[in-house]
């Protein structure tokens, strides 16, 4: 759910196994995950603008939100889509830990706040933009946290 995607033979050639590698998964070209991982930023933006229904389930199930941080990834989607009048500090995408819950479990529309956040994080790093807002953790603030855990069998079924 959190892995990096490598397709370019040169990138694969330069890759090494380190102690943080959990595993290597080889996927056939055209696999759902391959298609999803190779979406261009322009397509991701179009999907954010047209398919995101702003249901906010991605935020409600996000572990960062559930530990009490102010990060609401549906708002990043809204900003990324270019919605007028809903501007936020998109740099809060830097708080995304790329767990993949929003992408592979929460979103009913099959779109991926995780990939949008990864794209924005890389862009902000290149531009030396830092998230300056609060990062306070306060699990008690979300009383429903206990009921939002993702059951592994349901995740696997999805
Ligand atoms: S769960 Fe999907 S459709 Fe709902 S707000 Fe998040 S990205 Fe948009
Ligand atoms: S990938 Fe990022 S935005 Fe999505 S649920 Fe995980 S921490 Fe939240």
Image (cartoon, rainbow, N blue to C red):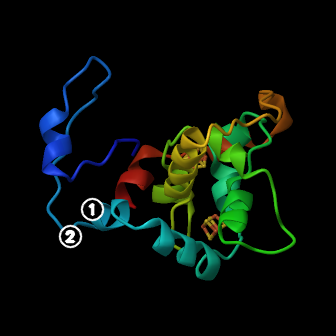
As displayed, is residue 153 above or below residue 140? Answer: below
When asked about the image quadrant of residue 85, the answer is: bottom right
The tag on residue 34 is 1
Which residue lies most toward the top here? Answer: 19
Left or right: residue 93 versus residue 43 is: right
Residue 38 visible at all: yes
Q: Is residue 29 left or right of residue 76?
A: left
Instruction: Assess disc 1: are there few (<14), some (14-19) or many (≥20) residues with their C-alpha within 10 Å of its C-alpha.
Output: some
Give residue 35's quadrant in the image: bottom left
Give the image location of residue 66, x and y in percent: 71, 40
The residue at the point 78 percent across, 35 percent down is: 68
Is the CB of mark 1 within 8 Å of ligand 2?
no
Residue shown at the point (57%, 58%) measured from the top left: 113
Please tell me which residue is depicted at 68% across the width and 54% down the height of the picture: 73
Rendered view: 137 above or below 156? above
Describe residue 93's horizontal placement relative to residue 32 as left or right.
right
| Residue named by callout 2 | 30
- Do we see residue 110 in this rendering? no
Disc marking residue 107: none
Give the mark count: 2
Q: Quadrant of the C terminus?
A: bottom left
* Relative to 100, 17 lies left or right: left
Where residue 61 appears, x then y in whole percent?
A: 64, 50
Q: Position of residue 117 (x, y in %)?
A: 57, 51
Q: CA distance from mark 1 to mark 2?
A: 6 Å
26 is higher (above) or lower (below) than 81: above
Find out whether the residues at labels 1 and 2 contact each other: C-beta distance under 8 Å.
Answer: yes
Which residue appears farthest toward the front when viewing the image? Answer: 127
């Amino acid at each position: 759910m959190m892995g990096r995607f490598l397709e370019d033979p040169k990138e694969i050639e330069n890759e090494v196994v380190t102690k943080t590698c959990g595993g290597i998964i080889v996927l056939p070209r055209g696999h759902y995950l391959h298609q999803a991982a190779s979406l261009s930023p322009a397509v991701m933006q179009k999907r954010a603008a047209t398919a995101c229904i702003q249901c906010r389930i991605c935020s409600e199930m996000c572990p960062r939100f559930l530990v009490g941080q102010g990060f609401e990834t549906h708002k990043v989607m809204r900003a990324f889509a270019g919605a007028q009048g809903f501007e936020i500090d998109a740099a809060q995408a830097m708080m995304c830990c790329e767990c993949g819950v929003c992408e592979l479990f929460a979103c009913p529309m099959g779109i991926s706040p995780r990939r949008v956040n990864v794209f924005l994080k890389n862009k902000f790093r290149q531009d030396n933009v830092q998230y300056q807002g609060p990062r306070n953790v306060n699990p008690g603030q979300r009383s429903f946290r206990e009921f939002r855990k993702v059951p592994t069998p349901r995740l696997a079924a999805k």
